[in-house]
Image: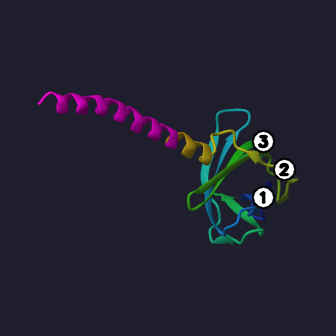
Amino acid sequence: MTAERDASGRAVVHAKVHNTGGRALDLTGALKMSQVSGNISAGPYPVDSGKSLAPGQSAAVNVIVTDQVTDGPWDVSLTLRSGLLEVTHGARITFPKGPGMAAAVLSHPDQGIPLHWRLISASAALVLLIFATLAIIRPYRRSTRGGS
């Protein structure tokens, strides 16, 4: 990710996105920011829409920060979505004092639970619920048949 201030002083965050999967991606998403020292947070700010990535392609995703924000440093969390796929990456950025671009920083996967683990957990809970229901119903059905 890269932090920038454009000629008008507006903060912009750029992220380079790579499609490593086997399907095209139609990207949407948002950026959230929280100041490293203090309790200030900002966003969510939408990513520029209309980006489609074929498998193996890369593209820049830009987020315009519509609020007046200090230079930082900021902990940012960028969530990108395409259909059911959702990926969140975080980084620590600092905006330049004047117009220009700061040095790029490497992002890292967000520490939250990834979507695929949430789906696996929900599926396991559903299977356990079905087995528990069957365990309760089965003895009840036997006792009602045998008693008549």
> Dividing the picture into quarters, in which one does residue 121 lie?
top right
The three-letter code of the residue at mark 1 reads: Arg
**Helix, strand or loop for disc 3:** loop
- Asked if residue 112 is among those painted magenta in the image, a careful observer would answer no
**Residue 75: x %, y % from top left:** 73, 42
Q: Determine whether 87 is above or below 7 in the image.
A: above
Q: Say which residue appears at 68% left-offset and 60% top-offset.
A: 63
Give residue 5's mark.
1
> Dividing the picture into quarters, in which one does residue 138 lie?
top left
Q: Say which residue appears at 51% left-offset and 39% top-offset.
A: 124
Name the main secondary structure of what is drawn in magenta: helix
Look at discs 2 and 1 and give the one toward the viewer. 2
CB under 8 Å between discs 1 and 3: no
CB under 8 Å between discs 3 and 2: no
**Helix, strand or loop for disc 2:** loop
Disc 3 marks which residue? 73
Give residue 27's mark.
none
Range of residues picked out in magenta: 123-148
Look at discs 3 and 2 and give the one toward the viewer. 2
Q: Quadrant of the C terminus?
A: top left
Q: Determine whether 56 is above or below 79 in the image.
A: below
The three-letter code of the residue at mark 2 reads: Val
Q: Determine whether 92 is above or below 49 in the image.
A: above
Q: Say which residue appears at 74% left-offset and 43% top-offset.
A: 74
Residue 67 horizontal side relative to residue 99, left or right: left
- Asked if residue 135 is among those painted magenta in the image, a careful observer would answer yes
Label 3 and label 2: CA atoms lie apart by 12 Å
Give residue 105's mark.
2
> Dividing the picture into quarters, in which one does residue 104 lie?
bottom right
**Helix, strand or loop for disc 1:** strand
Label 2 and label 1: CA atoms lie apart by 16 Å
